[in-house]
Image (cartoon, grey):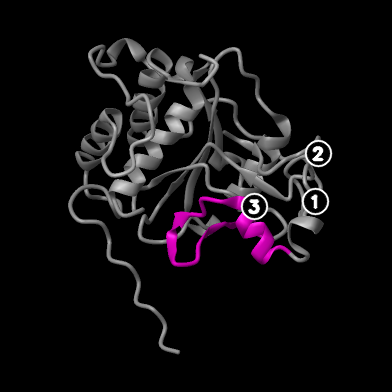
Amino acid sequence: MSGDAYNTGSGSGGTAGGSGQTTSVRLNATGLSPADKKVLCKAICVCNRQPDEGRDGADLKQQCVSRNLRDLDKSMNWQSPYKAEVNYDMSQDPPAPIMRSASPLEPHGYLPGWIQKYWPGGLADYPAGSGAVRRPDAVIVNNPALPPTQDNLRSVVEVKFPPQTIDKEQQAADGRIAGSPDKATVMGPGDCDCSQDDGDENPAKSAVSDTMSQLGRSLRALFSSRPPSLPGFGGAPAPLPPLPIP
């Protein structure tokens, strides 16, 4: 779910901490590499056909994509190039990913706790609705052994299912997060050939804590078949950098 993270009201969008200028982004997935597009389309097609279901019976297609990408990342010790719903602190320049301090490759799972601990003044002074924290649907990194900082981002992706519309404020935020409008994109079922999707495959209907969902396993198999020309594609993941000596 993209947008203004921990937003309790309407805000001015994702330009907090920046120049305030609007950043345009491309509105299709043509800028993604074929390998990246294939992985994301796999999740989009399956979740479009068999989405998660909300308590009220609503189809949760976007959440289905995010959950399965997160399952994939977790199964790879948080060293997948595809990371779902990473929060970014837009008060920093460049915007900084909000990761777990004990596991810097893992997105922080509880934003209010991070705000209370690290934001000046805590939750009481956090400017909810101002775009101070933004959360793209997915980011793709070059080196999975490093955090998703701007210098390691290959793409920032918003996933939209009809009749969802494009959020211009989120587009501007994605451009800032990526460091270039050419690295931010929006994609949906119309960008994928879902006729080639495996009709017998269904994603799990609820979050899986210890094992990957069926879709997650499929994504990992697809990911592992990529040529080993990029760090993390095929074989063992790239080693973590050594910790600095105090």
Cα distance between the residues tagged 1 and 3: 12 Å
Tell me if residue 40 can be seen: yes
106 lies above or below 184: below
Q: Earlier in the sequence, mark 1 or mark 3?
A: 3
The residue labelled by disc 3 is: 112
Cα distance between the residues tagged 3 and 2: 18 Å
Q: Earlier in the sequence, mark 3 or mark 2?
A: 2
- Viewer-nearest of discs 3 and 2: 3
102 lies above or below 83: below
Q: Amino acid at mark 3?
A: Pro
43 lies above or below 170: above
The C terminus appears in which quarter of the rendering? bottom left
Asked whether 11 or 191 is in front, the reply is 11
Q: Give the residue displayed 80% in from the left and 36% down from the top.
A: 9
Tell me if residue 179 can be seen: no
* Cβ atoms at labels 2 and 1 below 8 Å apart: yes
Q: Earlier in the sequence, mark 2 or mark 1?
A: 2
Q: Give the residue displayed 26% in from the left and 11% down from the top.
A: 199
Relative horizontal placement of residue 112, taking residue 234 as reference (left or right): right
The residue labelled by disc 1 is: 127
